[in-house]
Amino acid sequence: MQIKIYALIQAIRNLSFVFTLSYSTTVYAYDPVDCLGDISKVDPEITVGLAARLCSGSWISEPVKYYQNVSEVDDSIPRGIAIDLCAGTEDSEKTIACYAKAAT
């Protein structure tokens, strides 16, 4: 009887370890590499230097979303200026609204 309880405790411990290891890793995090992949889908002709400037330190997808939507507000904005405006934004909707208000 004691051996069965020990085996059950050992199995529960092993499963707990597997679940903890599986769900506590950074596999599910968004990082600058993901940002580079997203920006290359949005703008396939973007240079590596501009993409790196946009995605530097980006741990959320908001800079890419903003870059994608800024052309709807101002279709003549130079790419470099759009990158400077987009890099580091934490809320693409608020940043677009602010830019649209400033442009009028």
Image (tube, rainbow, N blue to C red):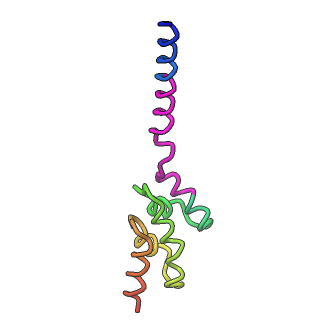
Quadrant of the rendering where the C terminus is positioned: bottom left
* Residue 99 x %, y %: 40, 82
Q: Is residue 12 above or below residue 60?
A: above
| 80 drawn magenta | no
Closest to the observer, 6 or 101: 6
Q: How many marks?
A: 0
* Residue 96 x %, y %: 43, 78
Residue 19 lies left or right of residue 89; in this view the side is right
* Residue 38 x %, y %: 56, 60
Residue located farthest toward the bottom when viewing the structure as drawn: 104
| 29 drawn magenta | yes
Residue drawn where x is 57% and y is 56% of the image: 37
Residue drawn where x is 53% and y is 59% of the image: 48
Closest to the observer, 76 or 91: 91
Residue drawn where x is 51% and y is 29% of the image: 18
Closest to the observer, 74 or 76: 74
Q: Which residues are magenta?
A: 14-37
Residue drawn where x is 50% and y is 33% of the image: 19
Closest to the observer, 19 or 9: 9
* Residue 64 x %, y %: 50, 65
Q: Is residue 87 above or below residue 7?
A: below
Q: Main secondary structure of the magenta part?
A: helix
